[in-house]
Amino acid sequence: MAGYDIHQHLWPPPFVEALRRRSGPPCIRGDELVLAEGSYPADLNAHELEARIALLDRAHLDVAVVSLQPTLGIQSLAGSERDELEQAWEEGILELAAASGGRIRPLSPRLPRAGFAGASVGADAFEDLDVAAPLLDALRGSGFLFVHPVAGSPPSADRRWWAPVVDYTSQMQRAYFAWLAAGQARWPDVRVVFAILAGGAPVQLERLGCRADAPVESAHENVFLEISSYGRRAIGLCADAHGAEQILFGTDAPVVDPGVAARSLVGCGTELERLAREETPARLLA
């Protein structure tokens, strides 16, 4: 079964060069990516276009939607520094997308424009929807918004897993419920995709229903969930709570091997697998 991966990251050469020129986080020093959270292997070979196309082939994927991950901490930089990195990524990714034969579909880290399937933001963007309004207005009826965690707190030496497991999920739950409470009624024609199952937030819809003082409707048909890093049980619970037709296949490659998400989705049954890999992303990208 072929299909779409809605959550990948790809660094074009101009962006890598811009990171190498920097002296502070985020930057690349030698073979390491240096972030405020800590240092990690950069694995730049995984960001070569030829290697990415080969990865798609091995994973039986036709198209990857790629974004500039907010976990790098770029959004917290001063305006000129942020602009330099985002512009380098945008210009470089458009070149890679053009050379990919349609297999790479990028999302802009800024306002959407020609060549991009929509835009991506950090989960904290929904803390003030008035600030996010220009972007959301620009997405009315066209493209979609991908919501991704931002950088977490620097971990202790024995808890390097803390940020992705605790910080990221709590960010996504806050973003999900902020959108349900105040966003989807204001922008009902904007399609929003929450990465990592919105941190499992749909499981909390039952608890929300017990609160008579919470005037929050269930998720709109334009609200979607991407599955990367979760397994059969979490995917099944969120599909049951939020709707199987709102689930999207995503892998977080190259951070996570695509096989993890593929195996998890297979365990959810052929119908959900077909919807998440093929029908729902095709509808989203149409």
Image (tube, rainbow, N blue to C red):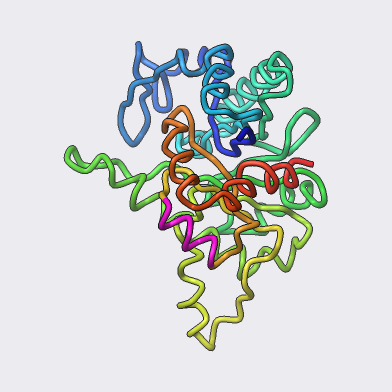
Query: As drawn, is 215 to the left or to the right of 69?
Result: right
**Is 239 included in the stretch rendered in magenta?**
yes
Q: Nearer the viewer, residue 120 or 77?
A: 120
Choose top left, top right, bottom left or bottom right for residue 264: top left
Quadrant of the image containing the N terminus: top right
Position of residue 159 measured from the top left corner of the image (x, y, whole percent): 22, 43
**Residue drawn at point x = 68 percent, y = 48 percent:** 280
- Look at the picture and state if 215 lies above or below 120: below
Magenta: main secondary structure: helix
In magenta, the rendered stretch is 232-240
Depth check: give the residue in front, 282 or 180: 282
Say which quarter of the image contains residue 41.
top left
User: From this viewpoint, which residue is outermost toward the bottom?
Assistant: 212
- Quick one: 247 or 217, which is closer to the camera? 247
Residue shown at 35% from the left, 11% from the top: 30
Residue, far left: 158
Relative image position of residue 132 (x, y in whole percent):
66, 52
